[in-house]
Image (spheres, rainbow, N blue to C red):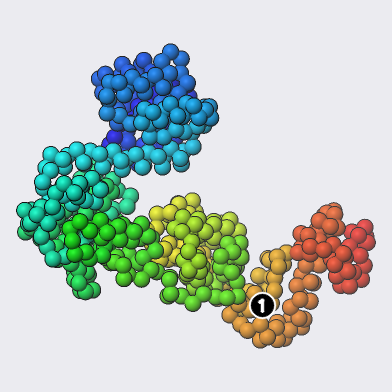
Amino acid sequence: MFTVMIVDDEPKLRLGLQTLIPWQGLGYEIMGTAASGKEALRIVEEQVPDVMLVDIRMPGMDGLQLLQEIRRRDLDTHAIVLSGYADFEYARQALQYGVEGYLLKPVNKEELSALLQKLHGKISAQRLEKAVQQEANSREWTVYSLLSGSHDLESVSLDELAESLGMDWPQYQVVLIAFPGLHPEEDERIRSFRDRLVAAYAADGQGVVLYFAPYTVLLLGKTLAGDFRRADLYRELQMLSGEIRTQMDVAAGETVQELQKIPDSFRTARSLLDRSFFFDKGKLLTPETPESYRQAVSVSTDISLLDGEKVSFRLYYLVDVGHAEAIHSLLDETAAQMVIQGKGETEIRDRFFYLANETLRKTSPRLWSESIYPGEPTQFLAGIYNQRSIRDLVGYVAAVMERLARCADYTSRDNEMKRMLDFIDRHHYENLRLEMLAELFNYSSSYLGQLFKSHTGEYFNAYLDKVRIDKAKELLTQGMKVYEVAEKVGYSNVNYFHNKFKKIEGQSPSSYQKKQ
């Protein structure tokens, strides 16, 4: 954990920052607070924090004077400046002292958390660099310096260095191993994994293992030729990782012929890990690995699956009528169209959260209780952001929606036509169409129209109008205004409602209301 000091003369802000930010989750712990620059200096004389959050405006010694004194004393700490004033002159002066960021009050939680996360990686890299500098001619330092760009390629012959270190291999390939959600520099399980990796792949001189934040790097002198070799490596890495294997992502970069070109292989592997959400889990990623949903699903053309409102409308109806078998297909097609359109991971997660949340909001709480889901709806929704791949995300949401649909499926106690009429009765105020019902209940439109006429003696639209007018009569009896009733039962045009009512009831809505 890296230590943090909060320096601000406002007690509420000091307390607020301690509780607002998930410090431990970001890899930090609060070592203390100070109400002034002088108090902060007294504390750092005993312990220098890794990070200081400093307010610009404070009585006595202000934030800029504190930063100046810290730099004069050459203290090894990183500073983030907070200010209630959008003053660019203050920002310019603060930047002279090497601050990591300048944030305006009130502090935005997401913005500060993102800055702290970025700073965590920077501090980790700096510490590692200091450590490995003590072994300037080691294999690990050579690889690290090439990946970080700190190696002076003109001052030394890499061919000679590779030969002296026993790294004059015919080919090189970088394999990156990541554990999303874990802190590699803090987690003892990851350190143990790296030790086992060194014993398995570096002890014989045919590989190099090092930590390059946030990745464990495995540089291979024997490249991964063929699917069997790649699958074999992935299985071995899973075995070595032990209990944390379920959180492991692995990617191999391109094969290069020269030591100085290993950064190219590294960049390829890193780009794959950056997009790991779009790949199926359980395999080693390579430039040849196909992305999930890129070409696997034929996308429906009858609705735009990029229109979140239309898809949520369809998903809710599928749940409501108990059409569980169609839910996964709808979500698969939604994911496929978003991938094909180039939507990012965040946008896809947000869209699936919206679809699930809208469905739960409209669905009867009874269905949730009957679904016997091990948790509350809020826990299920939060889990959307914990799914590691797009296919996991689709399966996670689909499984719960299918649970709800099966609880809503009452075909065992009613025939399908009664089920359909009940659906119309409950959704009469919405934009119902015969074509939509046909798709929900898996009929052709023409056949359903005939079936409907045979069962009710009326065509679909006429039946729907009668249901709406019956509902309107109930509302008029309660004293609701005519234009309000029209909208409430599904007619956007009050004149159209007036004509329909008079045609069916033989009198106008207002006349009916007066008689009642």
Q: Position of residue 141 (x, y in %)?
A: 16, 47
Q: Amino acid at mark 1?
A: Glu
Q: Position of residue 487 (x, y in %)?
A: 78, 60
Q: Position of residue 140 (x, y in %)?
A: 15, 49
Task: Point out the image quarter for the N terminus.
Answer: top left
Q: Name which residue lies at 10% across and 46% down.
A: 137
Q: Name which residue lies at 41% across and 63% down.
A: 390
Tell me which corner region of the image, top left, top right, bottom left or bottom right, holds residue 224: bottom left
Tell me which corner region of the image, top left, top right, bottom left or bottom right, holds residue 75: top left
Q: Name which residue lies at 25% across and 20% down.
A: 46
Task: Point out the image quarter for the C terminus.
Answer: bottom right
Residue 498 visible in the displayed image:
yes
Most extreme residue toward the front is 154
Give whichever of 424, 107 is nearer the camera. Answer: 107
Q: Is residue 139 left or right of residue 407?
A: left
Tell me which corner region of the image, top left, top right, bottom left or bottom right, holds residue 185: top left
Q: Is residue 273 left or right of residue 436?
A: left
Give whichever of 383, 107 is nearer the camera. Answer: 107
- Identify the residue under disc 1: 435
Most extreme residue toward the top is 60
Q: Name which residue lies at 42% across and 75% down.
A: 296
